[in-house]
Image (tube, helix red, strand yellow):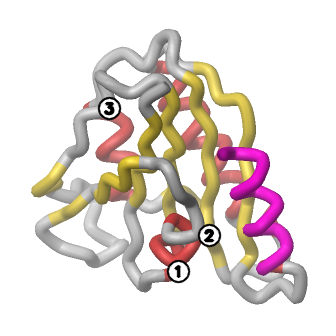
Amino acid sequence: MKKAIVYYSKTGNTKSVVDEFTGFDVLEVKAANQDPNIKDPVLTFCPNVSSYDYVIFASPVHGFQLCKIMAAYLKQLGSLKGKEINLFVTHHFRFAWLGGNQALKQMEKLIEEKEGRVSRKVSVNWKAKDRVSVIKKMVIEYS
């Protein structure tokens, strides 16, 4: 099974979680401008996931929703039909319902529009006391 993690990370928090995984090709989404307030970001690198059987998409939460760079990337993807797909987001909000859950729902909707089906979703709260254990559990479940 060919596995990849596709991520975007503005501050490095999401990347630090991605770095916990082994056995995956790590593919970074890149944009011309890192400003989270840009309405229509210009992507400079869009990883091709067509040859992968299993893909994890990872993104930070910006402004209580999925960051615009990851949203733009997911919108430009081709079909995800038949792939195993899992998601995670990182955020600094006290509660997941303040943005993490919303961002995961937005990611899942965009993936479903590409004929994909999400198996698991995790919201990683960067301020939570149990953050390290949440990440470790997710890495085991997703690997």
Amino acid marked by disc 1: Asn
Label located before the other in sequence (1 or 2): 1
Q: CA distance from mark 3 to mark 1?
A: 23 Å
Amino acid marked by disc 2: Thr
- Mark 3: few, some, or many residues within 10 Å (few <14, many ≥20)? many
Residue position for label 1 = 13
Q: Quadrant of the C terminus?
A: top right
Nearer to us in this view, 99 or 58: 58
Label located before the other in sequence (3 or 2): 3
Q: CA distance from mark 1 to mark 2?
A: 7 Å
Residue placed at 62% from the left, 39% from the top? Answer: 86
Asked if residue 19 shows in the view, the reply is yes
**Element under disc 3:** loop
Residue placed at 50% from the left, 70% from the top? Answer: 19
Which residues are drawn in magenta? 132-143
Q: Is the magenta region chiefly helix, strand or loop? A: helix
Q: CA distance from mark 3 to mark 2?
A: 22 Å
- Is 108 drawn above or below residue 138 in the view shown? above
- Is 77 drawn above or below residue 102 in the view shown? above
Q: Nearer the viewer, mark 3 or mark 2?
A: 3
x and y percentages locating residue 18 in the rendered image: 51, 65
The label number, if any, that marks residue 90 in the structure image: 2
x and y percentages locating residue 126 in the rendered image: 70, 82
